[in-house]
Each structure stands twice: as structure tokens, then as C-alpha cells.
Image (tube, helix red, strand yellow):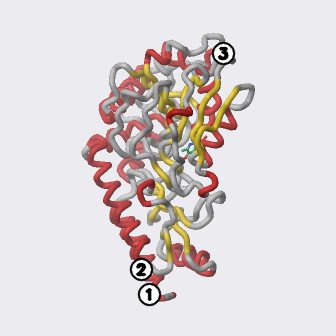
Amino acid sequence: MRSILFNAGPAALPEAVLHQAAQAMIDIPGEGQSIAEISHRSRFFENVLDEFKQLFRNLLHIPESHDILIVQGGARLQFALIPLNFLPANKTAAFIDSGYWAHTAMEYASFGNQTECIASSKTQYYRQLPDFDPKKINKQLHAYLYLCSNNTIYGTQYHTFPQVDIPLIIDMSSDILSKPINFTHIDLAFACAQKNIGPAGFSVVIVKKSFLETAQTQLAPALSYKHQAAKHSNDVTNPIIAIYTALLNLRHLHDTGGVAAAQERNSQKAHSLYTELDRNSLFNAPVNPTDRSQMNVCFFAKQEQHHQAFLTYCQTQNIKGIQGHIQAGGFRASLYNAVTQEMVNELIAALRDFEKEHA
Ligand code: PMP
């Protein structure tokens, strides 16, 4: 029996996608070989990459002004590659510190580079988005502004992005494909695959072509976004199983109404869970209501002894993945695209039953 999965990433994938991926592991229909065996230089995989990029573009209405790159490695590799590609020695990268991942990205950029934290909500335990004053941006000094759209660990999310007159770079690892995004004013967005895209092993980088033109050229090819774009994302040997499974997942998203329909389902799921948490006498969801994430719902037991007791109760209900991140404590239910309203209803029922027994 499949568990009811609220994992933060690697995260739940639709069962139909897993069945198709399982079939391809033995024999890709019409190819006579497994997806684990096929060459990254094959026509088949070239077509996978082309269809992936086209579908990704269509699903998110990404304008032709932007390139879509599929690159080896996860989000932290992009934390390191972004300054290598876009931060010249005489400039500083400006960061909004909204939580662990934004802060870690700043630490990565700080190796050999100038960085400046221009807003932080650390003293509010990251339970709200930082107050950002655009006047802190200095066009002469700052190469770009970096922020993280969805704070996977503490459960905050940008519902609109700040407007700035320097390049804007956004880590969208944990909310890409969950809602429509206007990419017009975004110079670079990236996301590791292991939440809404597919299995872990690669990242997607969406970069404005005019911004890519400004990238450093004195870089080894595997580190250069310009090189990856010139090679149509098929130079290094890509993680083929993960990318193919992600393509199956994109097709599934397309067939179930696309990103706008996903957003409607995601809003409903998050609304139902927050409503229960705000009502339930034993739990609380401390994130500032206007900044609450629709992807990662963080909550706590009001009484210490209920923490382990609720985890144990969830295990008996076949509910998995709700332990909070070690940095934040408490609980976290990740409601990515593949998590259905029915799964959320099971968690709500568990919260109610637990309250009846322990209140
Ligand atoms: N950014 C965000 C928003 C994340 O949630 C995560 C965790 N998956 C990362 C970065 C780090 O991802 P990776 O493990 O792929 O480096």
C-alpha cells in the first residue's frame, strides 16, 4: 500500500507517472532498451530534452526572451555557479535572507566574493518575509538581488516579488510549477528537480538571454551557463532517468489542466489545512498569515508531549514525512502538486481525531 506522503523533497510523484517510469526502466516503448541504458546522444534523449524544454516553457508561459537550461546537480550547485557566472570581482551580490536556503546561498556566494545581506527575518525566526527597502539597492555596487521564492524549511512564500532595477535572481526550488509566474522581470530563476519537477539529480535554470550575455566567459565549460545554453543542455552526461521521469511528470501536469489548475488545487489544499490548524486547540501554525506558504505548511504542537505522540499517531494512519526540518522543529506538511486534496483530508482527519483523544 502506498503511504500518504508529505515529504519535503524528494517528494511525492503521481502514481501514474511512477508506473510509466517503471515500465521504461525495463523497456522504453519502441526502443528495445531501458531508460538506464540509453545514450544521452541518442535521438530518443535529444527528443526528451526538446519536449521537456518546450513543455516547461508552455506550462509556465516562459517568454522567448528567456532560455531554459537543464543542468546536472541540485540547487546548491547553482548557489555556487551563479556567482561564478554573474558576480564580477568589483561588484557585490545583494541577498534577502528569508531563511535557511537563502542564507546558505549567501554563504556559498561568499567564497571569494563580496556579498551583502540587505534584509533578513532571522530575528523573527523566519516566520515572516523580511522587510525589504528597495533604497538599499545600489546600482553601481550590486550585481544582482538574490531571493528565495518559497522558504521550504520555515514555511513562508513570496506571493509577489519586489521590483528592482538591477538583475533579479530567484531560487524557485520549492514552488516552481505550483502557480503561474510572470518571468518578464526575472533575470534568472532556478529550481532543483526533487519537488514539483521530478526525481532528484538535476536542476532547471530559466535565464534571460540578455542577462546570459553578461556571464563570465573564463570558466570551465561544465561550470558555464553560457556553454550549457550553446550546447542545448546536452554536453555533460545528464541524469537520464531523472529527466525522463520528470518529462512524464510534466506531461501529467499538462494533462491535468496545467499550472493554473494546479494552483487552484494547491490553494484549496493549503487553505483547508491552515483552516484546521487555526481551529485546532492542540496545534498552531505560527507563520504570519499573509506570508504563509502554499507548498510547505509548518506547524507545532502547543504542548511538548503531543509532538512525538502525534508523529506516532500519524504512523498508525500511514501518514509519512510530516516531521519538521531539524532547523525549524515542529511539523511540516509539504503540499506539492502530486499531493491530492484527499491526502490532505487524511491529515486533517488525523489532526481532528488526535484532538478528540488528547484535548
Ligand atoms: N533551495 C531550496 C528552496 C530548497 O528547498 C532546497 C532543498 N531541496 C535547496 C535549495 C537545496 O537543494 P539541493 O539539495 O538540491 O542542493
Residue 135 visible in the snapshot: yes
Q: Secondary structure at mark 3?
A: loop
Residue sitting farthest toward the right: 112
- The crowd level at tag 2 (other Cα within 10 Å; few <14, some 14-19, many 20+) is some
| Residue bearing mark 3 | 220
- The crowd level at tag 3 (other Cα within 10 Å; few <14, some 14-19, many 20+) is few
* In the foreground, 44 or 52: 52
* Disc 2 to disc 1: CB gap under 8 Å: yes
Residue at figure coordinates x 39%, y 46% from the top left: 159
Q: Amino acid at mark 2?
A: Arg
| Residue bearing mark 1 | 356
Q: Secondary structure at mark 2?
A: helix
Image location of residue 101, percent across then percent down: 60, 44
Name above or below for residue 187 compared with residue 122: above
Image location of residue 354, percent across then percent down: 47, 82
Residue at figure coordinates x 48%, y 71% from the top left: 318
Instruction: Name the quarter showing ligand 1.
Output: top right
| Disc sitting over residue 340 in the figure | none
Q: Earlier in the sequence, mark 1 or mark 3?
A: 3
Q: Amino acid at mark 3?
A: Ala
| Residue bearing mark 2 | 352
Q: Amino acid at mark 1?
A: Lys
